[in-house]
Image (cartoon, rainbow, N blue to C red):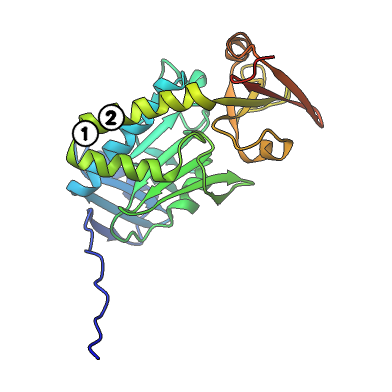
Amino acid sequence: MISIAPIAPPLLIGEKRVVLRNITWDGYQQLLKILGDNRAATLIFDRGTLEITMPLEQHEFSARLIEFLIRILVVELGLKIKTMGSTTLDRSDLNRGAEPDNAYYIQNQPLVAGRTVDLATDPAPDLVVEVDITHTDIDKPALYASLGVSEFWRYNGREWRIYQLENSEYLEVSVSPTFPILPKEKLYEFLAAAQLDEVEAEVDFRNWVREMIKSNYRIYCKFDVSYRNRQDASSTRKFTLCGMGILPVLENGAISKLKRTFSSDLLIKLFHHFNKRVIALPESRKIALFFDRNTSN
């Protein structure tokens, strides 16, 4: 009998990396100044370890198309967004800094709209995306958790992993808290289709999102007047929306798994837009509100 060894999947090469160790915070800052802003390479610093990443075609394709997918979702779902791109996210008090592939303010967009973000006083981005096709020496989930990033996406060229911040640590989840409408398979399908025709992939994905919204779209939310951001600015952000998207059930147990934030003005708009049915469920000092567009009562 002739045995045939399984064929290993082709090795994906998405980045070239250079790692420097025993680098001080001041040394890291000096290198940022020397390199300047007009560069393709990105830097990430984690308590003495500095990694310089030079993205290749596969990396850039994945990062830019995931960014485009996020933009489509935000637009079609009627959300707000502030795009940070690879803006340097430095925290000298943590001895850590990063330039992610993509970073966004979505839930906290009103807090930083129209001005330059200052991480000394502003919250971290709500969503960070990293494409790591080749090995990295940096523990990126630990780094972004320490920065306070609520949701972290990581894509290695084959698998999309989603992390949600809980008690200062990441919990890997199967559905994005920000976009629960989006199954993982749809991202894979979108990237595969975009390899052949990006325009057709966009049209198909946008139409899919719109159809999902029309056919079975639900929003559920809770609000708490004691909600606080990093600076305890409770007066500016009082309403916390748990999630929006295609939900298998409407039950109180789902509330703790998905978190979104919106202003009181947007919550009022939701009441007017989703005027079919409202269900209120008590949860300690919070109120959970469920809206269902498909209900006739």
Depth check, front residue: 186 or 60: 186
Q: Quadrant of the C terminus?
A: top right
* In the image: residue 30, left or right of residue 122: left
* In the image: residue 132, left or right of residue 162: left
Q: CA distance from mark 1 to mark 2?
A: 6 Å
Amino acid type at circle 1 is Glu
Q: 10 Å neighbourhood of mark 1: few (<14), some, or many (≥20)?
A: some
As drawn, the residue found furthest toward the bottom would be 1
Position of residue 100 measured from the top left corner of the image (x, y, whole percent): 35, 42
Mark 1 in CB contact with mark 2 (< 8 angstroms) = yes
Position of residue 276 measured from the top left corner of the image (x, y, whole percent): 65, 14
Residue under the point 62% across and 17% down: 236
Residue under the point 62% across and 45% down: 166
Indicate the quadrant where residue 220 lies.
top right
User: What residue is shown with label 2?
Assistant: 202
Depth check, front residue: 297 or 70: 297
Amino acid type at circle 2 is Glu
Q: Residue 145: tell me if it is visible.
A: yes
User: What residue is shown with label 1?
Assistant: 198
Q: Is residue 44 above or below residue 249?
A: below
Residue under the point 33% across and 59% down: 136
The disc label shown at residue 291, or none: none
Residue under the point 72% across and 24% down: 224
Helix, strand, or loop for circle 1?
Answer: helix
